[in-house]
């Protein structure tokens, strides 16, 4: 087990390099909806660290990736106690929270997305609304953590919410070179776990199912997707950490240019490589 000092038992005013007079402002979103069990557990736990505001989807948005809603109005419900819901995606929620003044008193110190009901391992980081909610903030230089837990509605989110709080406290108190944006993807195993392991995005392979069916009116429709069949051969993959009983923590890249393919791209462009 990797050592994890119990940060949350320490007086919170000593945890931050930001002013001890100002409690950190924590924005929480998710893709399961503002009243999801995982979000409520996270909110309850991180309230020990600072002021928490929830801006999350009114309806479940799992698998919506980084969709933003630009072709219809977005409706807002104020549920009280700094809990808001928006009938859009996680990215919409974070965008609105950051750029519409009514939601937050100032720019948040950190954005947490989750705790998602279900894993976001391997290539799921591309499909995940949870990860996108965190990425929307990280793109703007705000440190962000996407949090997911294997299993569904029935799991006990308590231990993972407590661990998420420690990770949040550490990220808040860690200086980042040149104020660099940080985007972390965390996955908790179902049940208790041994510690946290830093890992890489694996290559989870799903069953590539297409199931054609017919509706009662006789029109054909499809179900796509399936279960995970393989975790790929990536060394130190996130899914391997979780399978070994650890919470997986993966730092994600925000700069998509693939430098290794610069020469290939210039060759294909037909220009000299200089
Ligand atoms: Mn979800």
Image (tube, rainbow, N blue to C red):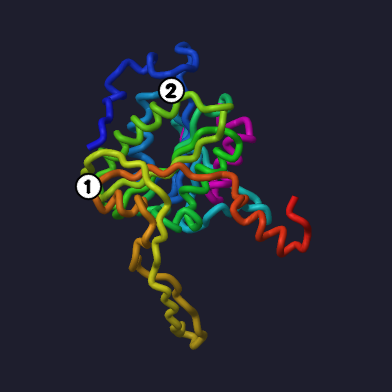
> Which residue is the site of mark 2?
173
* Tag shown at residue 191: 1
Identify the residue at image location x=40%, y=31%. Answer: 168
Q: Is residue 165 left or right of residue 221?
A: left
Marking on residue 227: none
Left or right, residue 33 beside residue 164 = right
Relative side of 101 to 203, left or right: right
Outermost residue to the top: 21
Question: For residue 94, which quarter of the picture?
Answer: top right
Q: Position of residue 87 (x, y in %)?
A: 54, 50
Comparing 46 with 16, the one in front is 16
Q: Which residues are magenta?
A: 82-104
Sooner in the amino-acid sequence: mark 2 or mark 1: 2
How far is disc 2 from disc 1 in space, using C-alphas?
28 Å
Q: Residue at x 49, y 88 (%)?
A: 218
Question: Measured from the top left, where is residue 60 in percent x and y?
Answer: 45, 54
Q: Is residue 63 visible?
A: yes
Q: Is residue 100 left or right of residue 144?
A: right
């Amino acid at each position: 087990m990797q050592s994890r000092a119990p940060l949350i038992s320490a007086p919170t005013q000593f945890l931050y390099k930001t002013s001890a007079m100002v409690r950190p402002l924590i924005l929480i979103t998710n893709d399961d909806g503002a009243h999801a069990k995982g979000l409520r557990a996270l909110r309850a736990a991180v309230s020990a660290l600072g002021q928490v505001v929830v801006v999350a989807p009114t309806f479940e948005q799992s698998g919506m990736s980084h969709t933003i809603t630009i072709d219809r109005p977005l409706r807002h419900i104020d549920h009280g106690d700094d809990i808001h819901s928006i009938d859009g995606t996680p990215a919409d929620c974070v965008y609105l929270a950051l750029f519409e003044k009514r939601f937050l008193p100032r720019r948040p110190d950190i954005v947490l997305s989750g705790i998602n009901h279900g894993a976001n391992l391997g290539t799921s980081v591309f499909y995940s609304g949870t990860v996108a909610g965190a990425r929307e903030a990280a793109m703007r230089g705000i440190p962000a953590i996407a949090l997911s837990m294997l299993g569904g509605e029935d799991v006990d989110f308590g231990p993972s919410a407590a661990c998420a709080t420690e990770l949040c406290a550490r990220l808040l108190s860690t200086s980042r070179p040149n104020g660099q944006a940080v985007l972390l993807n965390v996955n908790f195993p179902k049940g208790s776990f041994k510690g946290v392991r830093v890992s890489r995005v694996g290559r989870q392979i799903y069953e590539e199912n297409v199931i054609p069916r017919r509706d009662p009116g006789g029109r054909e429709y499809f179900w796509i997707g399936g279960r995970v069949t393989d975790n790929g051969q990536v060394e130190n993959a996130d899914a391997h950490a979780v399978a070994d009983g650890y919470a997986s923590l993966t730092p994600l890249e925000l700069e998509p240019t693939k430098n290794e393919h610069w020469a290939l791209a210039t060759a294909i462009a037909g220009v000299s490589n200089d």
